[in-house]
Image (cartoon, rainbow, N blue to C red):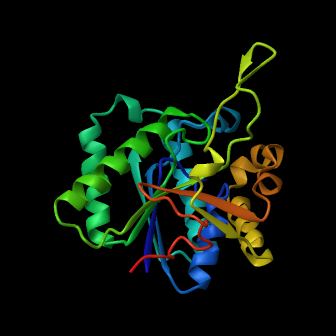
Amino acid sequence: MKILYIFPHPDDESFGPAAAMHAQLKKGHEVYLLTLTKGGATKQRVKLGVSVEEMGEIRYKEMQEVRKTLSLTDMIVLDFPDSGLKELDPRVLEEAVKKHIENIRPEIVITYPVHGISGFHDHLITHAVVKRVFLAMKDNGADYLERLAFVTIPDSREPSMSNGKFRFKHTERELIDCIILLQQDDIEAMKKALSCYETYKATIEASGVVEKVGDRIYFEIFMENQKPVLSDITENIR
């Protein structure tokens, strides 16, 4: 089965989804990655003293190492403006996403959930664009598209406001449709993918992402209510 992940930035695929990608590749699925920007606007460029364009090329080279590390079936990196997707005509983004879906013809498309996990506007726009393209293509006869899923984290269920500060909400647990239990080699693959981003080493270590992911990856599945939850994103597809 073909699975296409679509994210806005380099390293989005490695902060968790890489472990699921590795698990899916092990099972013989084709796993593709489409990234909308080269991520050149990151603050890391200031520390390195390079331009947005130069930083984009640095991150692009790091992504090539991720591709090799995970043995992705294919990877495409576009060059839309990092941190600038909100300024674009969304139809331009939609056409680019549509083109790559048509080329790959995946059964499953995966992107960020509506909250984008972090709330970053590039994440939110990517969610909206991918969802709209998926539905429009289905309406226009792209019958190979079977499932739209969102890689996510479950909400902590803590109060939405504490000490006068709002807490960002994630996916309600009842909306989780698939939980992939990771094997140790999946977790090691995620660590190796993260280590490809040498310019982000300090940030990755400070984030504690490996510990936060733990031994499972969560997905919402759009317009499906899977109970009991699936253990594989390809389950219950004809």
From the viewer's perspective, is residue 156 above or below residue 191?
A: above
Q: Residue at x 50, y 75 (%)?
A: 234
Q: Residue at x 40, y 65 (%)?
A: 147
Instruction: Tell me residue 100's x, y (percent).
Output: 31, 62
Q: Quadrant of the N terminus?
A: bottom left
Residue closest to the far top: 164
Instruction: Tell me residue 106's x, y (percent).
Output: 36, 71
Instruction: Tell me residue 55's x, y (percent).
Output: 56, 44
Residue closest to the far bottom: 28
From the viewer's perspective, is residue 62 above or below residue 108?
A: above
- Total labels: the figure holds 0
Q: Is residue 167 left or right of residue 35?
A: right
Residue closest to the far front: 227
Q: Quadrant of residue 181?
A: bottom right
Q: Quadrant of residue 158?
A: top right
Q: Residue at x 73, y 67 (%)?
A: 192
Q: Quadrant of the C terminus?
A: bottom left
Q: Quadrant of residue 159?
A: top right
Q: Is residue 131 left or right of residue 180?
A: left
Can I make out residue 89 in this image?
yes
Q: Is residue 61 left or right of residue 91?
A: right
Of 23 and 230, nearer the camera is: 230
Of 195 and 157, nearer the camera is: 157
Can I make out residue 82 in this image?
no
Instruction: Tell me residue 216's x, y (percent).
Output: 72, 64
Q: Residue at x 60, y 55 (%)?
A: 176
